[in-house]
Amino acid sequence: MKNKLITYLRESFFQPITFIMFILFIKIAAFQVVIFDNKSIVHNLLVEFPMWALLLMVLMIIFKKRSWLAIWIYSLLLSTLFIVVMYYTRYFSTVPSYYDVKQIYQSNSVGGTVALLGTPYDFLFFLDVVVIIPLFYYFSRFSKPITRPIAKRWAIIFSSIGLIMTIIAFRNPLIDVSFFAKQHGYIQSQIVQVFERSIGKAFATNDNLSDKEIAKLKGNVYVPFSEHDTFGLAKDRHVFTIQVESLQEFAINLKVNGQEVTPHLNSLLKDSAYFNNVYQQIGAGNTSDAEWLMHTSLYPEGMDPTVNLIDDSPIPSLIRTLSKNGYGTATYHADDITYWSRDTLYPALGFDYVFTSDEIPDEEEIGFGPPDEVLFSFVESQLPKQLNKHKLMYSNIITLTSHTPFEMPEEYEFLDLPEKYEGTYVGNYLQSIRYTDEQIGLFIKQLKKLGIYDDSIVLIYGDHSGLHGAPVTEQDQVLLRELLGHAYNIQDRFLVPVLFTVPGIFTGEASSRLGGQIDLMPTLLNLLGMEHNAQMIGHNLFQYEQNLLGMRYYLPGGSFISDKMLYTAPSAKHPASLYNQKTMKKTKNTDRMQEKIDNTLLIMKHSDFIRTEQTKEK
């Protein structure tokens, strides 16, 4: 009996496969340390490792006699995947799901900064592929091969453990993917996401929140839309929305070496209502999610670009409301229309005119497309024709030049920066923002020449942060501290400026009232005196003093932003933190914190229900 047991153990475990499992475990453990800062051997052995090992066993069984080839291919693919996840996490500060890996071909924002994200040590993940496995195969090729029965034994062990851990994962709520992946395993987190997206949402219930209830959850007393003080204040005006790539709030009124970074935006403040406490709320769709927020006042999906969840069937939008009120509508973005599926998004929103890289000239390029001066010049060329056909026009302009990595040709660098900014990420960023500001200033001059500036609303806002992730070096952090007068923090990163420029109505009003990108559409519609025929999650920034904001993807699930606090839920690498909004210092004030977490999640859940209902196939 004893000899049989020893023989069984030798045949099962003391084989080349044991060495391969050990190498795989080391790789998995290294991945856990780099991504999650998780050094627990027990956790890695029981939670993370079994599912990855099971996949290898399945491949070996399928490949039969070519098991070594299966091992090598699997190791190569796994190393590549881990590198992609590492780079993505360093830039976006969130662990990607299979949605993001599926969309990696569209991630220009990552592709343009790959050189800034990697280190030579990263390629140690390929050490087994290049050296260890080939050498071990060479020296063991005359020994007993890895047989299917041995692989099956290992597969039974790993599948049993993996099944238990997956069942445990399903018994826990998936609020934040990164934190869930750390706690329950990366593969398990993907399985749960697939289930929730394809099956779980079919059983989702709606709490049917009314406008009054949403206002109450945010801390406000509901006032009917048409009874707001600003309703119709700017009625019957042309509307221009300028969504500025990577424009962060701190750039407004900022001076470097005695020079204004945004002199033209600063000059517009005298004709504007300026909101300086508005947060980005985009998800994985980045710029396209900002367009979604602007035109629907609904939360983006988060882990998947929202444009992936819709078809080109009509949905309630700002565009359709404007059209019903006599506006012609146009959108301009000097990029490929298929990028982030805008070929689906724009028909769904209902634009009359769509201009992208197919129409906008590309005789020269900066970064990912024509410079913004070409974009604005094209808009100017189209306006007279549109104004002949439509009494009122809505023009949605998406800039592109100030996109990471912010490298500008010397002739477009309008700032004379000190030498310490030379070649830095911050220096490049400031130059790109200054360039785009110049083009906005020239565009405003053209509106005045056309005689429509005084009869227009020009809404200018940033789509998302530009300075974040691994590209921001220690040297950049020092420069930012000098510029801002304090260490660059999460608030500096997520605040975007919002200017409602309405000549003759606003005369330089500035507000620190808390807002989010989800509030832009209702605020604009209220100024125009228009009711929307679908529920909006955002509200009129001129009317309500309190707010409660959620943010997916760039903050862990369960985080919230309120007038007094900014709460970041626990993530893969960081514990939960609560900040005072005014000082951005951590606080222990937990008064009503759980209530605000619950209220935020409830509002976002209701937004998802609205979006799901609106985007169902007609």
Image (cartoon, rainbow, N blue to C red):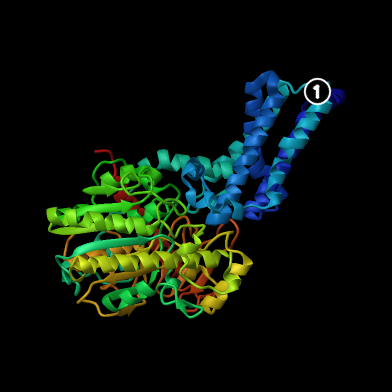
Type of the residue with mark 1:
Arg
In this view, which residue lies farthest toward the top? 65
Total numbered labels? 1
Q: Residue at label 1?
A: 141
Quadrant of the rendered image containing residue 575 = bottom right
Quadrant of the rendered image containing residue 274 = bottom left
The image position of residue 464, as x and y in percent, is 43, 61
Packing grade of label 1 (10 A; few <14, some 14-19, many >=20) is: few
Residue drawn at the location 60% of the way across and 58% of the way down: 573
Residue drawn at the location 72% of the way across and 45% of the way down: 124
Q: Please indicate, yes or no, whether residue 538 appears anywhere in the rendered image.
A: no
Q: Quadrant of the C terminus?
A: top left
Depth order, front residue of 506/565: 506
Left or right placement of residue 25 versus residue 83 in this view: right
Question: Judging from the image, what secondary structure is the residue with disc 1 in?
Answer: loop
Left or right placement of residue 508 versus residue 230 in this view: right
Q: Quadrant of the N terminus?
A: top right
Q: Is residue 194 above or below residue 435?
A: above
The image position of residue 556, as x and y in percent, is 50, 58
Q: Is residue 616 above or below residue 118?
A: above
Quadrant of the rendered image containing residue 216 = bottom left
Residue drawn at the location 66% of the way across and 41% of the way down: 49
Q: Is residue 50 above or below residue 609?
A: above
Q: Please indicate, yes or no, whether residue 388 appears anywhere in the rendered image.
A: yes
Depth order, front residue of 476/58: 476
Depth order, front residue of 88/106: 106
Left or right placement of residue 564 versus residue 424 in this view: left
The image position of residue 325, as x and y in percent, is 13, 57
In this view, which residue lies farthest toward the right? 3
The image position of residue 293, as x and y in percent, is 33, 57
